[in-house]
Image (cartoon, rainbow, N blue to C red):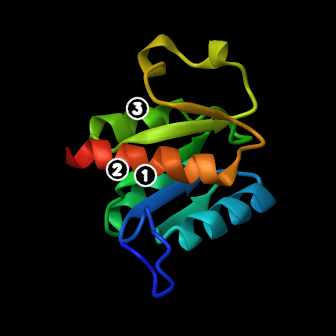
Amino acid sequence: MTTQSGVALPLEGRRILIVEDEYFQAREIALALTRAGAEVIGPTGRAEDVPDLIASGGVDAAMLDINLGQGASFEVARSLRQRETPFLFLTGYDVSIIPDDLSEPPRLEKPVDQARLVDQLAGLVRAQIS
């Protein structure tokens, strides 16, 4: 899992779904994940797009913005959990907005440190394999 220059690619070969409705934020996250070796699925800011994106080849982990403009992404989170797909929330909202049944996944606050986001997603993927 390294590049020719010897740099580790913690998400190499992993399909990571980005659900984020803010274009520039989604683009920056996609670039960071691609640099970490991930195959980015999406990004999308529409909850209704997620089933088709997952069906296009599955995902290893997902990053969800809580507020998608059209409402919260909690149903997306529940469907990912049902599929046993690990995910994390990326949000500007306080933890109190997250329903009790979704309190276990990690939550990162915006603006996010991209290295921390990559580390968290890599940890989710590693935990899934273990």
Q: Earlier in the sequence, mark 2 or mark 3?
A: 3
Amino acid type at image mark 3: Arg
Query: Residue at coordinates 46% horizontally, 35% vertically from top-left?
Result: 77
Residue 32 shown left or right of residue 102 in the figure: right
**Circle 1 SS class:** helix
Q: How far apart are marks 3 and 1 (CA)?
A: 21 Å
Q: Residues within 10 Å of mark 3 (few under 14, many from 20)?
A: some
Residue 125: which numbered mark, if any?
Answer: 2
Residue 66 is situated, as x and y percent measured from the top left of the image, at: 63, 34
**Residue furthest out toward the front:** 6
Can you tell which quarter of the image residue 12 is in?
Answer: bottom left
Compared with residue 2, is residue 94 higher up or lower down, i.e. above or below? above
Q: Earlier in the sequence, mark 3 or mark 1?
A: 3
Mark 2, mark 3: which one is toward the viewer? 2
> Which residue in the structure is indicated by mark 3?
78
> Which residue in the structure is indicated by mark 1?
122
Residue 38 shown left or right of residue 58 in the figure: right
Query: Residue at coordinates 37% horizontally, 38% vertically from top-left?
Result: 79
Residue 4 shown left or right of residue 127 in the figure: right
Query: Residue at coordinates 50% horizontally, 38% vertically from top-left?
Result: 88
Compared with residue 73, is residue 99 higher up or lower down, i.e. above or below? above
Q: Do callouts 2 and 1 mark residues in contact (Cβ within 8 Å)?
A: yes
